[in-house]
Amino acid sequence: MKYDVIIIGAGPGGIFSAYELVKKKPELKVAVFEAGHALDKRHCPIDGKKIKSCIGCKSCSIMSGFGGAGAFSDGKYNITNDFGGTLYEYIGKSQALDLMRYVDEINMSYGGEGTKLYSTAGTNFKKACIQYDLHLLDASVRHLGTDINYIVLENLYADLKDKVEFFFDTPVETVKIIDGGYEILCKDQSYTCDKCIISVGRSGSKWMEKVSKELEIPTHSNRVDIGVRVELPAEVFSHITDELYESKIVYRTEKYGDRVRTFCMNPKGAVVNENTNGIITVNGHSYEDPSKQTENTNFALLVAKHFSEPFKDSNGYGESIARLSNMLGGGVIVQRFGDLIRGQRSTPGRIEEAFITPTLKATPGDLSLVLPKRILDGIIEMIYALDKVAPGTANDDTLLYGVEVKFYNMEVAVNEKLESCYKGLYIIGDGSGITHSLSHASASGIHVARNIVAD
Ligand SMILES: Cc1cc2nc3c(=O)[nH]c(=O)nc-3n(C[C@H](O)[C@H](O)[C@H](O)COP(=O)(O)OP(=O)(O)OC[C@H]3O[C@@H](n4cnc5c(N)ncnc54)[C@H](O)[C@@H]3O)c2cc1C
């Protein structure tokens, strides 16, 4: 079967490439191959009762399927060049922002209208932060919420399904270069195309590594972010989250000069497990629907670890630390901040007595046995710094879940069109290592689609 364009991966990168391709050139024959299920078939079996923890499904419904890793996410589209990826380095700052705004318009017209757009511009909180050497990054944040995000995806699929051919539960095994295009090999069949967009996200990182090796596409990798998810009563951060929803705050530690940052803030949200290649780490989300909200706010505190030669396996380093927490706790470990400071493990009794109810069932334990000292020291220093702008952050009962790891895909060499060294082979989204967010991944999809149409 022959197509004009084949897209590998139906996450935001793949979806928005398909959207823009058929919008700008409806006559194009486009196919999307997705390893995971269709949206309505995506169900994580963890129900908290019969199945309490990850059972390692063949295709993880949280990470894979129509909507990609973003399908059950909090749906926070950060419109900024300050974080979420380095797309602007390839296509320029103003174009990157224009594309993110365009994605926002599409989301609004597919069910997101009425959701809030928050902005850090002109906020007094920035001044309060800087007095304590905390740096609030600039961004506009569209918060769709897990529920509306899902509706937007449903509507996008309903629109695309008659214009684009979708192959679900069809992982692509190999990409081959053939005369005048590409051959896409799946388990039972192969397909050819003139142009190919690879958008395999984080879950496709190992596959991307393999394909890059086979095709001799240069790659580069040296970073992993490691830390904890903090959970506290929503009131502690409400003056910030009510105004900004998501605040990305960066702090440089006095002790080592390391950068620690807040990441993925979920007001009135829940802490959740995340399964990356069989290793259980922690994440968080929140709902727009008040009936699903909790009394707690959670966010990650992450320390970026960069490695220099000869060490190359930064993700392997992060995985080893996460594996250690899984070994000690059978999954994610939770510890009260007060226990951590006193050098004692949290016990089920101490968690029970706390003035906060954890939203994730994790094993009470001791994070100092898991996290490297330098990383833990940085996190503790930042918690005390945050306590100055959000008093209560450093309370004894503040819960720390570990570990949270943010893996970065290795960066694949592409040009300003996000085209690899092979003409017509594009690599976009989180799978390219260039983006790490919904808005940047989606924008990269629009960008390649426009380049393909213009070619
Ligand atoms: C729990 C959670 C919450 C998050 N919350 C937010 C948030 O609020 N805001 C934000 O900006 N970001 C968030 N993120 C990150 C965001 O989801 C990703 O940055 C974004 O989804 C990247 O889009 P993508 O299209 O590049 O990749 P993905 O969304 O990962 O999609 C890639 C797709 O490719 C498929 N695939 C992989 N390999 C193959 C193959 N060989 N053949 C066929 N298909 C393949 C996968 O199954 C997957 O569906 C969150 C992530 C998680 C896991």
Image: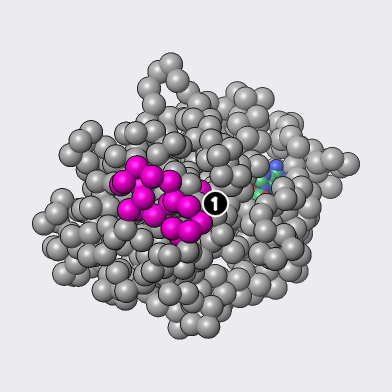
> Can you name the residue that lies furthest to the right here?
188
In magenta, the rendered stretch is 333-351
Q: Is residue 125 above or below residue 374?
A: below
Task: Give percent across and percent down for residue 402.
Answer: 47, 47
Callout 1 secondary element: strand
Seen from the viewer's position, the closer of residues 445 and 84 is: 84
Judged left or right of residue 315, residue 305 is left
In this picture the colour scheme is one colour
Seen from the viewer's position, the closer of residues 24 and 256 is: 256
> Can you name the residue that lies furthest to the front here?
349
Q: Is residue 419 magenta?
A: no
Residue 321 at least partly seen: yes
Q: Residue under label 1, please give it.
A: 363
> Can you name the residue that lies furthest to the top here?
310
Residue 447 at least partly seen: no
Residue at point 38%, 45% (across, down): 344
Judged left or right of residue 448, residue 207 is right
Residue at point 30%, 68% (across, down): 237
Q: Is residue 335 magenta?
A: yes
Residue at point 40%, 64% (across, down): 354
Q: In the rendered structure, which amino acid carries the disc numbered 1?
A: Thr
Dot 1 surroundings within 10 Å: few (below 14), some, or many (20 or more)? many
Task: Give percent across and percent down for residue 432.
Answer: 53, 41
Q: Mark 1 near ligand 1 (CB under 8 Å)?
A: no
Residue at point 29%, 39% (across, down): 377
Task: Give percent across and percent down for residue 48.
Answer: 66, 64
Task: Give percent across and percent down for residue 300.
Answer: 40, 54
